Image (cartoon, rainbow, N blue to C red):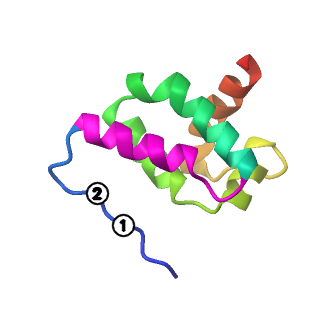
Amino acid sequence: MIPVPQPPADETREHRLKRLYMRSIRRGIKEMDIVCTRFADAELETMSEADLTLYDQLLGENDQDLLLWVTGKEPAPAPYTLMIDRMVAVMGKA
């Protein structure tokens, strides 16, 4: 298993947003680049700290799993259900 890098404890919100944005636009598969970039553009700036933490964890998931969740081919795990719903809603507005 590949270790997940831990952000610094003293990371500023500005740096955190930039880091999450970069992780959103540079995914492993093009479909998730599109989904995560649109979501980040629409939502990152206004997300609460708790939502940012959850999104950070979500970005650590496998892209193939994320794609199954956002397309509804498989249900998202409980911690991510509402975040995936938000991502799908953003894609519906595009």
Magenta stretch holds residue 34: no
Magenta stretch, overall SS? helix
- The circle on residue 7 is 2
Name of the residue lying farthest toward the top: 93
Indicate whether residue 20 is drawn in magenta: yes
Where residue 87 sits, quadrant-wise, is top right
Mark 1, other Cα within 10 Å: few <14 / some 14–19 / many ≥20: few
Give the extent of the magenta segment.
13-29
Tell me where residue 57 appears, x and y as whole percent. Answer: 46, 54
Give the residue displayed 32% in from the left and 35% down from the top.
49
Q: Residue type at mark 1: give it.
A: Pro
- Classify residue 3 by image quadrant: bottom left
Q: Residue at x 52, y 52 (%)?
A: 59
Check the image and report above or below for 34 versus 11. above
Q: Which residue is drawn at 73% across and 42% down?
A: 70
User: For this rendering, which residue is in front, 47 or 74?
Assistant: 47
**What is the quadrant of the C terminus in the image?**
top right
Horizontal side of 47 relative to 76 (left or right) equals left
* Res 75 visible: no
Above or below, comparing residue 30 to residue 15 in the picture: below
Task: Residue 42: name its quadrant.
Answer: top right
Query: Any mark on residue 5, and which?
Result: 1
Give the answer, above or below, for where 30 lies relative to 87.
below
Does the CB distance between marks 1 and 2 fall below 8 Å?
A: yes
Total number of numbered discs in the rendering: 2
Between 93 and 82, the residue placed more toward the observer is 93
- Name the residue nearer the viewer: 48 or 34: 34
